[in-house]
Image (cartoon, rainbow, N blue to C red):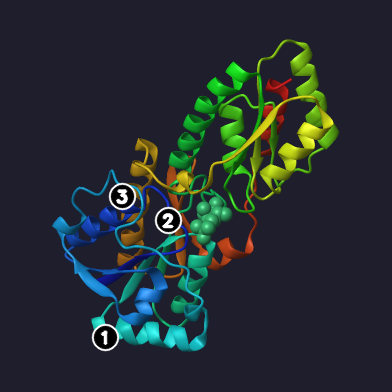
Amino acid sequence: MKKIGILTSGGDAPGMNAAIRAVVRKAIFHEMEVYGIYNGYQGLMEGNIKQLGIGSVGDIIQRGGTILYSARSEAFKTEAGQEKAIEQLNKFGIEGLIVIGGDGSFQGAVKLTEKGYPCIGVPGTIDNDITGTDFTIGFDTALNTIIDAIDKIRDTATSHERTYVIEVMGRDAGDLALWAGLADGAESILIPEKPHDFDMVIDRLQKGQQRGKKHSIIVLAEGVGNGMDLGNRIQEATDMETRVTVLGHIQRGGRPTGFDRVLASRLGAKAVDLLLDGKAGRMVGIENNKLIDHDIKHILTSKHELDMDMVHLANQLSI
Ligand code: F6P
C-alpha cells in the first residue's frame, strides 16, 4: 500500500491531532503518501482532500480539536453518498483509509471496507463508550477538564453552603460522570448504567448536612436526564440552596493531556501498521496497556461495559 487517507469524524476529541500526526509521520516513515480528508465523510464525498507532508502536522500535538475538521454526515449514510466517496478515493488513488472517531464514524468505515476499501478505526471520543479498548482518545482530557471545573465550583459551593448538580457529557455512557465523581468525591454519581434512587440521593445530602458538610456535589451523566430538573427536584425536596452547572462543550476542547497524546500517538501508528499488514475492517485499541485490534463489526455490535467495581467503590467512599 502506497497511498492512504485519514479523516476525523463525529464529535471532536482532544488528542485527535496527535493521532493525525502519528498517522502521517508513521506512514511517511514507511515511504507512503498520506492524504488528509477534510470535514469527515462529507469532505470525502466532496473531494475535499489534500496531501499531508511531514511539516503539515508540526506543532499540532499539543492542540485540541482536529486540523482536519469534523462533521456528522447524513448523506454519506446513503448508497449514493458512499458511491461518491469511492469515486473520490479512486480519483486520488487512495488505497486504504484511517478513520478517527466514535461508533457512528466506524459504521462508515465498515461500509467502505465492505465495498473493497480497507479501513482501520481509531477510537476518538470523549465519551469512552467504545468496547474493545480501555480508553478512547480524548476521555482523559475531558475528565481532567471536568475535575478542574468541579474543583472551582467546590470553592464557591463551600462559601455559600450550596448543593451543586454538575451535568457532564458522555452521551449514553456514564464513564465521564463516574470517573469525575470518584475523582472529586461527589456525594452521588448518577449514571445511565445503574438506576438511581432519588430518595437515597436526598438521604445522603441530608446526612451530610447533619454532619456539618458545607457543600455537596452531585455529578449527573447527560444520559440520565436533565440537570435543571434534578436541581429543581432537590431544591423542592430539601431546604438546601441548589445550583446547576451544565459543563457542555467546554469538555470537548483544550490541550490534550500527556496520557491522551501518548495514547493517540500509539493508536495512530498502530493503525498504519495494520494497513501495511494488509488488514481491513479493524479497530485499534488498548487493553491492559497493550495495543490490540478487533473486528470493527464486532465492536459495533457489542455493548460498552462500565466498570461496576468502580461504581461500588464510589458509593462506599461517599458515605
Ligand atoms: O460524542 C461526544 C459528545 O460530546 C457527547 O458527549 C455529546 O452528547 C455529543 O457529542 C454532543 O454533540 P454535539 O456536539 O453535536 O452537540
The amino acid at mark 3 is: Ala
The amino acid at mark 1 is: Lys
Q: Residue at position x 45%, y 60% from top?
A: 101
Task: Give the image quarter of residue 56.
Answer: bottom left
Is there CB contact under 8 Å for labels 1 and 3? no
Task: Give the image quarter of residue 257.
Answer: top left
Task: Give the distance between the C-alpha atoms of the residues marked 1 and 2, in whole angstroms.
Answer: 27 Å
The amino acid at mark 2 is: Asp
| Residue at the spot of label 3 | 18
Q: Residue at position x 24%, y 59% from top?
A: 24
The image position of residue 75, as x and y in percent, is: 48, 80
Q: Residue at position x 54%, y 42% from top?
A: 247
Q: Residue at position x 53%, y 62% from top?
A: 103
Mark 3 falls on what kind of element?
helix
Res. 241 visible in picture = yes
Q: Does label 2 point to a residue whose CB lies under 8 Å from ligand 1?
A: no
Task: Give the distance between the C-alpha atoms of the residues marked 2 and 3, in whole angstroms.
Answer: 12 Å
The image position of residue 8, as x and y in percent, is: 38, 63
Disc number for residue 91: 1
Q: Nearer the viewer, mark 1 or mark 2?
A: 2
Mark 1 falls on what kind of element?
helix
Query: Is residue 23 rendered to the left or right of residue 310?
Result: left
Binning the other alpha carbons within 10 Å of mark 2 as few (below 14), some (14 to 19) or many (20 upward) gives many
Binning the other alpha carbons within 10 Å of mark 3 as few (below 14), some (14 to 19) or many (20 upward) gives many
Query: Is residue 35 rendered to the left or right of residue 139?
Result: left
Which of the two discs, 2 and 3, labels the residue nearer the N terminus?
A: 2
The image position of residue 80, as x and y in percent, is: 47, 89
In the image, residue 166 above or below residue 52: above
Disc number for residue 12: 2
Which of the two discs, 1 and 3, labels the residue nearer the N terminus?
A: 3
